[in-house]
Image (cartoon, rainbow, N blue to C red):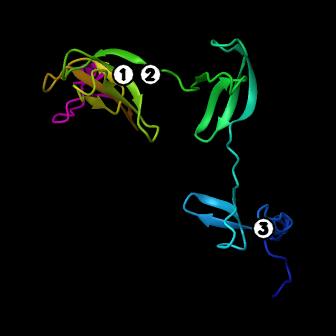
């Protein structure tokens, strides 16, 4: 059962063979490095020309109907190396930038550890949401789930967290030593 089908990526490779290296005129081939695939000259190491495949150079995705607060030029949504961002269309004359991410929300829940600050929604470097004291670095209190004002029925700790389980949302003590689930009014009536 042999068939003479062409290779799966032959059309893509033929497209690459028509692009000459701008430095030496050699053929550009796809190579793989620690940061992903790229095009490189087949005369390497005598020719060190490389070309990235992804062009995240700040190209304009959409023009926004808002003026720049610094120079009154229209703002644009751009795709950059680290994601989307809002910038001035008059760049490089105007360097105004704005982030597309929302500001951190203050939960108005007091910190149970230092009693000075409030818990604020933050994001880890991996994008996971957590809640930490705004008095950081003097106070390092943080919880991974949404904080709720209340007192633990078992240990008396001054903060509860919302825990989402298969059976529904339950309140749990935020103290790392306790972590007791709180009885709700419905459970008290059944007992």
Look at the image and give the residue range highlighted in magenta: 170-191
How far apart, in angstroms, are the residues tagged by discs 3 and 2? 52 Å
Mark 1 packing: few (<14 Cα in 10 Å), some, or many (20+)?
many
Residue at numbered disc 3:
24
Residue at numbered disc 1:
120
**Who's the residue at 48% across and 20% down the image?**
103
Q: Do the residues labelled 2 and 1 touch (CB within 8 Å)?
A: yes
**Who's the residue at 37% across and 17% down the image?**
107
Who is closer to the viewer here, 60 or 43? 43
How far apart, in angstroms, are the residues tagged by discs 1 and 3? 56 Å
Disc sitting over residue 104 in the figure: 2
How far apart, in angstroms, are the residues tagged by discs 2 and 1? 7 Å
Residue 169 in the image, given as x and y percentages of width and height: 38, 29
Q: Residue 131 magenta-drawn?
A: no
Q: Is residue 129 left or right of residue 135?
A: right
Who is closer to the viewer here, 23 or 176? 23
Mark 3 packing: few (<14 Cα in 10 Å), some, or many (20+)?
few
């Amino acid at each position: 059962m042999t068939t003479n089908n062409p290779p799966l990526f032959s059309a893509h490779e033929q497209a690459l063979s028509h692009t000459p290296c701008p430095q030496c005129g050699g053929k550009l081939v796809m190579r793989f490095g620690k940061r992903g695939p790229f095009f490189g000259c087949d005369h390497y190491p005598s020719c060190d020309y490389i070309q990235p495949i992804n062009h995240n150079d700040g190209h304009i995705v959409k023009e926004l109907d808002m003026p720049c607060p610094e120079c009154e030029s229209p703002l644009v949504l751009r795709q950059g190396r680290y994601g989307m961002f809002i910038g001035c269309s008059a760049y490089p004359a105007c360097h105004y930038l704005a982030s597309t991410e929302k500001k951190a929300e203050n939960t108005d829940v007091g910190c149970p550890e230092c009693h000075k600050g409030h818990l604020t929604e933050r994001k880890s470097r991996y994008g996971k949401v957590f809640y930490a004291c705004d008095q950081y670095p003097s106070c390092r209190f943080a919880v991974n789930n949404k904080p709720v004002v209340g007192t633990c029925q078992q240990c008396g700790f001054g903060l509860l967290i919302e825990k989402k389980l298969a059976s529904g949302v339950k309140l749990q003590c935020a103290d790392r030593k306790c972590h007791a689930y709180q009885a709700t009014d419905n459970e008290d009536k059944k007992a």
